[in-house]
Amino acid sequence: MTGSTGSTGTGGGRFSLTLFCWLVIVWLLLWGGLRPVVLLSAPLVALGVLLLFPMPTRRVPVLRPLRLLRLAGFVLLDLVVSAVRNSREVVQYGRDVRAAVVAVPVLSDVDHVVATAANLVSLTPDKFVLHIDRRGGVYYVYCLGVRSDEQVARAHDQVIDLQVRAVRALAPSAEARDAGRRADRCHRRGPVSPEKSPEEEP
């Protein structure tokens, strides 16, 4: 996809219809619902972001609808499962709930993909990206309910797998094709899915 696709001139920058649609989707995912006020505010927020922070004309985000739907499904499932898992953790351990900061390799070299993946990770109740080391290519992720090396490994790989879906949905073609191979090098235990909790064996 070239920089001119889905864009119109706006002075020193470009208005990208593709990026506008993506910002609307991100806003809806952040609010986790389709309430009227959210639906009405989404295009206004997206337009405001594009006008206040014009994107460069190169590397306009790529959207692949089917893979974007898979990414959204993965995130929604993770939201539900993480909420249930957190509730169980609090009921079982009370004040003794443990957490850890896990270093996870960043799979993308594209800024908007790195930022989107970090935001999606932070949507879940049991994970939050504390810091992105762009030079070192590392996310530092706060993970709740981690009590062993096995649980650390699984939480690590869940972040890797979410990144793979984000890269395949949003990154340039070359990076999207390479996502699986890069993830295989980073996995500690092999691919996992959000319905498997860090406490469960594969």
Image (tube, helix red, strand yellow):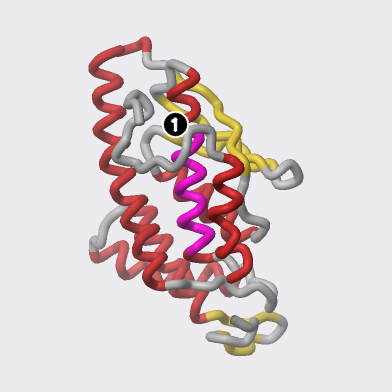
For disc 1, the neighbor class at 10 Å (few under 14, some 14 to 19, many from 20) is many
Which residue is at 44% across, 31% downward?
Answer: 154
Horizontal side of residue 165 vs 90, given as left or right: right
Which residue is at 57% across, 81% downward?
Answer: 15
Q: Quadrant of residue 13?
A: bottom right
Q: Is residue 47 visible?
A: no
Vertical comparison of 49 with 90: above or below: below
Q: Mark 1 belongs to which amino acid?
A: Arg
Name the one closer to the observer, 140 or 54: 140
Name the one closer to the observer, 116 or 201: 201
Say which residue label 1 marks: 154
The x, y position of residue 20, in whole percent, is: 48, 74
The x, y position of residue 202, in whole percent, is: 35, 31
Which stretch appears magenta?
154-168
Horizontal side of residue 92 vs 17, given as left or right: left
Which residue is at 30% across, 28% downward?
Answer: 86
Secondary structure, mark 1, is helix
